Every structure is written in C-alpha cells, then in structure tokens.
Image (cartoon, rainbow, N blue to C red):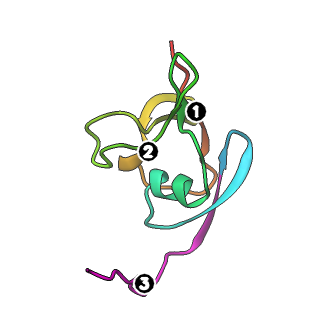
Amino acid sequence: MVKARRLATKRGGELRIAFEGETITAFEGETLASALLAAGVAAFSLTRTGEPRLPFCNMGTCFDCAVRVDDRELVRACLTDVREGMRVRRQEVK
C-alpha cells in the first residue's frame, strides 16, 4: 500500500474574496476552484433539478466549475487565479 504524505509548501499572501456574499480567505497563486474547495464550498452551481455541481476535470474542459465572477458569466474557476476583492456567485442555470 502506498502511503501519501502532504509536502510542506510556502503559500502566497492572504487575500479576501466573497462567495455568495460570505468572505473567504484565499492565497495568492491559488485557483479560484482550489480556494472555494478549501473553504468547504459544497456547490459551485446547481443543476436544473437542484443538485450541486463541483469541479470535475480541474483542467478547463468540462465547465462543471463555472461560476459568476464580478458579473461575468461562465468563468471556469479551475483556470482563474484568485485576486483580492473578487465577488463570486453560483452560476445560474438557464
């Protein structure tokens, strides 16, 4: 059996972003997807039937991580670096 261990790493400076109006601490150099997942966000968006959507591929192919950033729709969180003051909302299903 392979035993995994977490490697020590130096994180970037702290940033503050807002998700659905709640303040989240993120770090410079992180993607928006990793910051939201680390903060325990349970759904980046919802399907038409109300099921939660979260990142699937984490390489920009599937759009399951799509969110609204500063009123821009369909922003792929896995390809977007966090920046101070971002306003992020769940992507609305149309």
Magenta span contains residue 16: yes
Q: Secondary structure at mark 2?
A: helix
Question: Mark 1: few, some, or many residues within 10 Å (few <14, many ≥20)?
Answer: some
The residue lying toward the viewer, choosing from 3 and 88, is 3
Label 1, label 2: how many angstroms apart (C-alpha)? Answer: 11 Å
Name which residue lies at 61% across and 64% down. Answer: 15
The percent coordinates of residue 26 (x first, y second) are 58, 63
The mark that comes first in sequence, 2 or 3, is: 3
Asked which secondary structure carries label 3, the reply is loop
Picture quadrant where residue 50 is located: top right
Residue at 50 percent of width and 22 percent of height: 47
- Magenta run includes residue 19: no
Disc on res. 90: 1
Q: Which residue is mark 3?
A: 9
Residue 93 lies, with reference to residue 91, above or below; the image says above
Q: Amino acid at mark 3?
A: Thr
Circles 1 and 2: CB atoms closer than 8 Å: no
In magenta, the rendered stretch is: 1-17
Give coordinates of residue 84: x percent, y percent.
60, 57
- Relative to 36, 30 lies left or right: left
Of marks 3 and 1, which one's residue comes earlier in the chain? 3
